Structures are given as C-alpha cells and as structure tokens.
Amino acid sequence: MTKVFLIQELENLGSALRVNRNRIRDLVIDNPELFPFLLEISFNVNDKVSIKAAWVLELVCEQKIDWVAPYLDLFTLNIGKAYLDSAVRPLSKICNFIAITFNSKKDSILKNTLSKKHINAIIETGFDWMISNHKVATKAYAMNFLYIFGKNSDWVHKELKLIIQQNIPKESPAYKARGKITLDLINRQ
C-alpha cells in the first residue's frame, strides 16, 4: 500500500458520512503502514484532500492514539498550520485524545513519549485556536485539552479562564455552555 493509493482512496471517499470515513479508517487500521502517509496528507494544508485525511486521522486516533507517539514531532510542528475549519476540528479532537491519554492512569506508549516540548506546542496551538475565528467545536475541544494540560501548569488555567470570560458574552450558546463547564472545573481546583 502506498501514499498514492491512500490519496486515491481519500479522493474517492465521497461525502462526510460516517460510513465513508469508517471505511478508510478501517483500511488504515488494517494496514498500519498507511498511518504515516495519512499524517503527511493531513498536514498538506493547501490541498483539499487534507480535510478528508484529517477526518480519517481523527477516527484512527480515536482507536489507536498510541500510533501518534513516533510522530509527535511531526504532529506538533504541523497542527498549527491547518487553517480550514473542516481540518482544524479533527486535529483539535486528536489533541484532546492526547491530553486524555496523558492524564490517564493507564500506561501507554504515547504517555511515555509525550515530552514537555510536545505539550507546550499543543498548548500554544490550543490558545491560538481559542483566540482565532474558529468554530465552537474546535474551541470546545481546545478548552478541554487546555484544562487537562493546565493541571500541571497554573498559567494555562489562568490564561484559559481569562480568554473564556472575555469571549463568553459574544460567543454562541454552545460556547457559553462549554465555557461555563470549563470555568467550573478550573474554579474547583
């Protein structure tokens, strides 16, 4: 299986229906050698196929988050380069998976590989997403992973709290709801 083959599969994915995305997810999970190509395609941000790749990457990472471990440098160097909302949302969800895994009591390859440098890059990107013009889903995932990573860095919670409080009056009801949940979590610590 090659990168060209994976690109063809992504181009022929069809609509964003879950069944279509699951088909390519299963192809990648059954052929792990395709995973680095999927990452690479996801970060080819000026090509529309990167959106479909990011959709599939999210679904693969949902089941195989440890697969990201050898590629954390590539992932953290490139997540901030994505700018199309349809690609940024799944990347923010993957950052959330990474934070949840990091915070888990279970041992994992990802948890053992994730460095302070990687965490800082994810935090920086999360704050960029929070203050940029992104949709609420991206910001909701960012709130969650910033909250989780902020458990080990007081400044993260302070900055996150400030941004949420500043934005709540002008954001959507969904943002307000998620923001209030995050603020409650921060205030309980």
Image (spheres, rainbow, N blue to C red):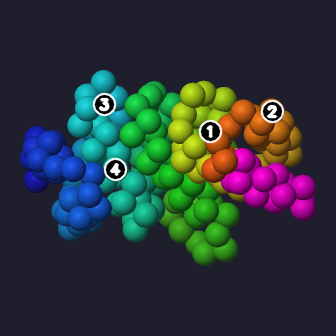
Give the crowd class for mark 4: few <14, some 14-19, many >=20 residues within 10 Å: many
Please state, as top left, top right, bottom left or bottom right, where the C terminus lies in the image.
bottom right
In the rendered image, which quarter is residue 30 located in? Answer: bottom left
Name the residue type under label 2. Gln
Whole-percent x, y for residue 133 in the image: 57, 28
Residue position for label 4: 55
Whole-percent x, y for residue 167 in the image: 75, 34
Q: Residue furthest right?
A: 188
Q: Verify CB contact (< 8 Å) between mark 2 and mark 1.
A: no
In the rendered image, which quarter is residue 184 located in? Answer: bottom right
Residue position for label 1: 126
Q: Residue furthest bottom?
A: 106
The span picked out in magenta is 176-189
* Mark 2 vs 4, N-terminal side: 4
**117 or 96, which lies in front?**
96
* Mark 2 vs 3, N-terminal side: 3
Where disc 4 sits, the SS reads helix
Q: Is residue 72 above or below residue 85?
A: below
Name the residue type under label 1. Gly
Where disc 1 sits, the SS reads helix
Name the residue type under label 4. Trp
Q: CA distance from mark 2 to mark 1?
A: 16 Å
**188 or 68, which lies in front?**
188
Nearest-to-viewer mark from 4 and 3? 4
**Mark count:** 4
- Residue 166 numbered mark, or none: 2
- Residue 44 numbered mark, or none: 3
Q: CA distance from mark 1 to mark 3?
A: 20 Å
Q: Is residue 162 above or below residue 2?
A: above
In the rendered image, which quarter is residue 48 located in? Answer: top left
